[in-house]
């Protein structure tokens, strides 16, 4: 397909995407999307979620439901041109500083912060824990729309810093790294995390949103 036509189609598709806060009715779709990119085998180029969602559907559905009731920055993207089954095409889960440290009390101490990272930023931030787009719809701008909505909601609260982790070992998430680069994130630090008998390496990225 010629590049111009492909870009135009992307733009048209993007105009059908609406981002809104999650509801309990979305949990089934969210589970399906997570399972489509969170499998046993990890695909570096497509991107992946670390957990294997098919391994325990009930557990993960409960987890999403609990988070949907607790977090104010849990969003879904829907395709309004295709109402009905499959219209939810992606989701984003973000935590405020208090919520994140409640679940991960050692996090600030566990991260090896980059010497150039301004520690003042740790006074107030939002952490994007998970973003996932239906596997066949990645690269159409849905992730960017979800991030735009998050920024629009947290800026009025005076929060200037967004943070996110990207796995680089044992399997690198190249899609996530490319996304961070495109979205102008900077390296904040690195963290090692034991998980299911392996040592995972996460890069911590931050983005200054004070200009938005
Ligand atoms: C990472 C992810 C959330 C990005 O969302 P998305 O809707 O695909 O991203 P966008 O279409 O808004 O892309 C924005 C930019 O990110 C980069 N990007 C996104 N996916 C990419 C991929 N698979 N490979 C390379 N670059 C990619 C591109 O630079 C793209 O810009 P371009 O369209 O001008 O080339 C999505 O690919 C995804 O859900 N992957 C699987 C799960 C995952 O890896 N989540 C992140 C870890 S929590």
Image: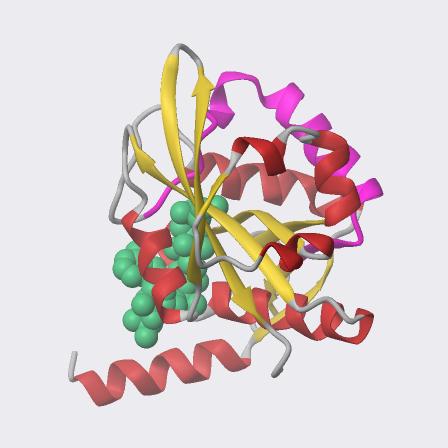
Looking at this view, is 148 or 135 the one in front?
148
Q: Is residue 39 magenta?
A: no
Q: How is the image coloured?
A: secondary structure
**Compared with residue 77, is residue 81 higher up or lower down, i.e. above or below?**
below
Q: Which residues are magenta?
A: 47-75
Q: Quadrant of residue 62?
A: top right
Residue 106: x %, y % from top left:
65, 28
Outermost residue, front side? 115
Q: Residue at x 61, y 44 (%)?
A: 29
Q: Position of residue 179 (x, y in %)?
A: 38, 62
Which sits in the foreground, 58 or 119? 119
Image location (x, y in percent) of residue 132 = 49, 49
Q: Is residue 133 left or right of residue 120?
A: left
* Position above or below: 148 against 117: below
Q: Is residue 61 above or below residue 168?
A: above
Residue 32: percent from left, percent from top: 53, 39
For the C terminus, which image quadrant? bottom right
Location of the N terminus (image quadrant): bottom left
């Amino acid at each position: 397909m010629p590049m111009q036509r492909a870009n135009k189609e992307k733009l048209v598709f993007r105009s059908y995407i609406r981002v809104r806060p999650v509801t309990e009715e979305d949990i089934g779709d969210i589970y399906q999307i997570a399972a489509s990119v969170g499998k046993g085998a990890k695909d570096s180029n497509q991107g992946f979620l670390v957990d294997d969602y098919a391994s325990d559907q009930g557990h993960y559905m409960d987890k999403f439901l609990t988070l949907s009731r607790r977090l104010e920055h849990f969003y879904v993207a829907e395709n309004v041109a295709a109402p009905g089954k499959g219209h939810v095409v992606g989701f984003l889960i973000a935590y405020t500083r208090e919520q994140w440290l409640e679940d991960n009390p050692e996090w600030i101490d566990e991260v090896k912060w980059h010497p150039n990272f301004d520690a003042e930023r740790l006074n107030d931030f939002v952490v994007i824990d998970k973003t996932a787009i239906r596997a066949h719809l990645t690269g159409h701008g849905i992730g960017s729309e979800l991030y735009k909505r998050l920024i629009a909601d947290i800026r009025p609260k005076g929060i200037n810093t967004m943070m996110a982790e990207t796995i680089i070992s044992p399997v690198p998430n190249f899609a996530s790294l490319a996304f961070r680069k495109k979205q102008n994130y900077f390296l904040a630090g690195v963290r090692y995390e034991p998980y299911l008998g392996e040592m995972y390496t996460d890069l911590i990225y931050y983005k200054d949103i004070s200009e938005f």
